[in-house]
Image: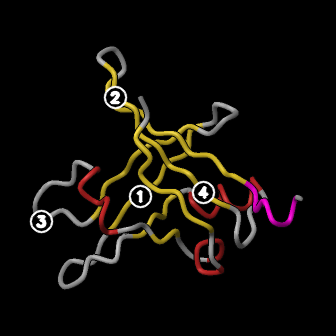
Amino acid sequence: MATVLIRKPLTFTDINYCLSYPARTLCEFPMVEGQTAIWFQARDLTGKVWNFELSIRPCGYPKPVIRGDWLNYVREKGLTVRDVIVLTREQDIQNGETYHVKVEPDLELTL
């Protein structure tokens, strides 16, 4: 069973700089105390693996963001403001943790 880590409409900042990640689900990543970043791989619907970095500020409000291959993913997929990004995590005994990323188009524009 997949756990949805983030499902959000993309903003201008998300598609031009980095993906803002909700602090409330930061606990879903195995970040060691004192660590400010963690790399993880997420597979898209075509099977391509993307290397993302989730990072936080070293002090104060964490303000988590995802970087790494994020902007390459945005460009390759042709993402626009209001497309919905979905990042999920699955855990199973054989493969351990796996992450998946997909996009749901802005349905208001496609109707």
Q: Residue at x 50, y 42 (%)?
A: 42
Residues rendered magenta in the picture: 105-110
Q: Provide the secondary structure element on which disc 2 rests.
A: strand
Judging by the rendered image, the residue that carries numbered circle 3 is 34
Mark 1 and mark 2 lie on one chain; the one further toward the N terminus is 1
Question: What is the C-alpha distance between the residues marked 3 and 4?
Answer: 28 Å
Q: Residue 8, how many percent across, how many down?
A: 55, 64
Q: Residue 38, how many percent across, how many down?
A: 31, 55
Question: Foreground residue, 38 or 92?
Answer: 92
Judging by the rendered image, the residue that carries numbered circle 2 is 91
Between marks 3 and 4 in the image, the one whose residue lies nearer the viewer: 4
For residue 99, above or below residue 83: above
Between marks 1 and 4 in the image, the one whose residue lies nearer the viewer: 4
Q: Quadrant of the N terminus?
A: top left
> Label 4 amino acid?
Ile
Question: What is the C-alpha distance between the residues marked 2 and 4?
Answer: 20 Å
The answer to the question of whether label 1 and label 2 lie on touching residues, with beta carbons closer than 8 A, is: no
Judging by the rendered image, the residue that carries numbered circle 4 is 85
Q: Residue 53, how many percent across, how many down?
A: 41, 58
What is the total number of numbered labels drawn onto the structure image?
4
Q: Is residue 106 magenta?
A: yes
Residue occupying the far bottom of the picture: 60
Question: What is the C-alpha distance between the residues marked 3 and 2?
Answer: 25 Å
Dominant secondary structure of the residues highlighted in magenta in the image: helix
